[in-house]
Image: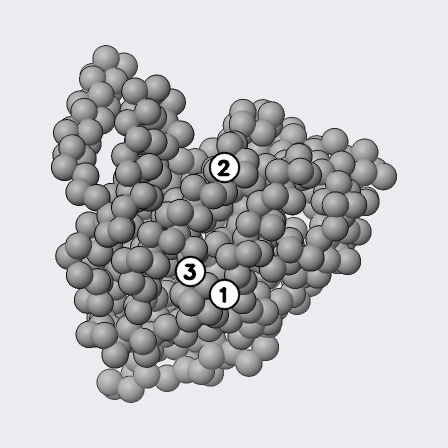
Amino acid sequence: MPFAVLIRPAYDSRNRSAPAVPWAYLYLAAVLRERGIEVEILDEMTTPNLEARLEQSLAKRPVAVGITAMTGEQIRHGLRWAKYVRERGGAAIVWGGIHASLLPEQTARHALADYVVAGEGEFAFADLVECLARQGNPAEIPGVFCERGGEILGACPQSFVDLAALPEFPYDLVDVERYITRRPDLGIARHFEICTSRGCPHHCGFCYIASVHGSRWRSLEAADCVARIKAVARRFGVDGISFREDNFFVQRERVEAIARALITEKANIKWTASCRINYAARYTPEFLALLRESGCSLLTFGVESGSDRVLEFIQKDISVAQVLNVARKMSESGIRATYHFMGGFPTETTGEFLETCRLIDALRAIAPDTVVREMSIFAPYPGIGLIPACAARGYHEPQTLEDWVAMDWTHPERPWLSREQSRLIADAQFLIARIAHPNAVVRAWAQWRWGQLVGSRAGIRLVERPWVEAARNAARWIFRTSTG
């Protein structure tokens, strides 16, 4: 029986929140098992002493070791594990995931990549493992890339996976309890994630999804979604779920059918999802009331900017007026709302970034319990629509897998941003993270300084930030030493 190992490298060493469920690997493993292939999933975010576990797995002589990575820090960890596998010989190293799908040829040229699986890999990876086991020619498998004599062979798949045709998830391959969390803010004792769709029909200029899924959206039928929710609730004793997918609300009729079924079948489970502003702008109070009755406790919206010009530039297809309208609707509906923002777009001025900060203030005025999850920095990921605008302003795309490690959405250094703009964005990120801080002193300071920033014409200089960071680090050190 062929054997494969799937490694999910750590994706954010700074993130202290609960790890996300490795859905991509659960999908892959389901197909592998259905074909009689033994498989193990090793998640660096949840597996104690991963090196020893991997050593044991490699001793079983796997045909292939799969490594997934998003653009950024996860690549660094992936390369570390690829080197570990290479030094112990034998297994083919196969890269997959978002980054490899966006740049399969460049990834396949790396010395620590024997093969790349681009796009949806459930069947391509299984085909590759079977092919390697019988010593066939993997270059003929759609979606598989490899280097031969300096030439890259392979082509991206031309079709997409039918989600309904995929086997059941092999949850026994992961420690599910490590992915179950508490959400006391929503009254949820045991919270889990599920996936019911893939893709998104929109073309936001900062998003890679269109490049991976071809702006195609596919989903399970409403009845299958409800059955999956109820099965997860029974098996793992969860009372709350999040729909972790690219765009849950694309088809309103499907969402309505899910909501009505949850009510009719007395599922008694709370749920959260992400929603687009232009969708919610069309929702009636009756529809929002239906969602709330079905258990909807929280909706998350990607707003990105408080400038209508910037929103048009990034092809977000929403307006500031719609954002404010939706905020009022959500406040009246009884469903909590959170909002995500982004700064540092090419062509964005300091004044336009401050418009974003003022919109955040306006949302908090409409609903004091509004949560702004983050202020991300725009990152020029491969394959996105804004790459030409970035290149015109001095951006040079990395040419090796290692060079992509530095790409993330937290550090505001971009060639089109002045030092003052980068500092302003960093200060705004710092304050937003502390506006609702549990420590009353920190919260009061952050709100005071945030008010000054919002009221300024060109931002403020947050000179005390190093001392605040030092105090935070000292508090963490005291906590670790006192509890360790």
Q: Residue at image x 20%, y 17%?
A: 478
Measured from the top left, where is residue 361 in percent x and y?
43, 41
Residue found 24% across the figure and 43% down from its top:
427
Residue found 22% across the figure and 26% down from its top: 472
For mark 2, what is the residue?
A: 365
* Disc on the earlier residue, 3 or 2: 3
Q: Residues within 10 Å of mark 1 (few under 14, many from 20)?
A: many
Whether 280 is drawn above or below 233: the answer is below
Find the distance from the CA under tag 3 to the CA under tag 2. 18 Å
Residue 425, image x and y in percent? 27, 50
On residue 316, the disc is: 1
The mark found on residue 307 in the picture is: 3
Closer to the camera in the image, 221 or 283: 283
Q: Nearer the viewer, residue 298 or 91?
A: 298
| Residue 463 numbered mark, or none | none
In the image, residue 233 lies at what x, y percent? 68, 34
What's the amino acid at mark 1?
Lys
- Tell me: 390 left or right of 436: left
Quadrant location of residue 69? bottom left
Q: Amino acid at mark 2?
A: Ala
350 lies left or right of 467: right
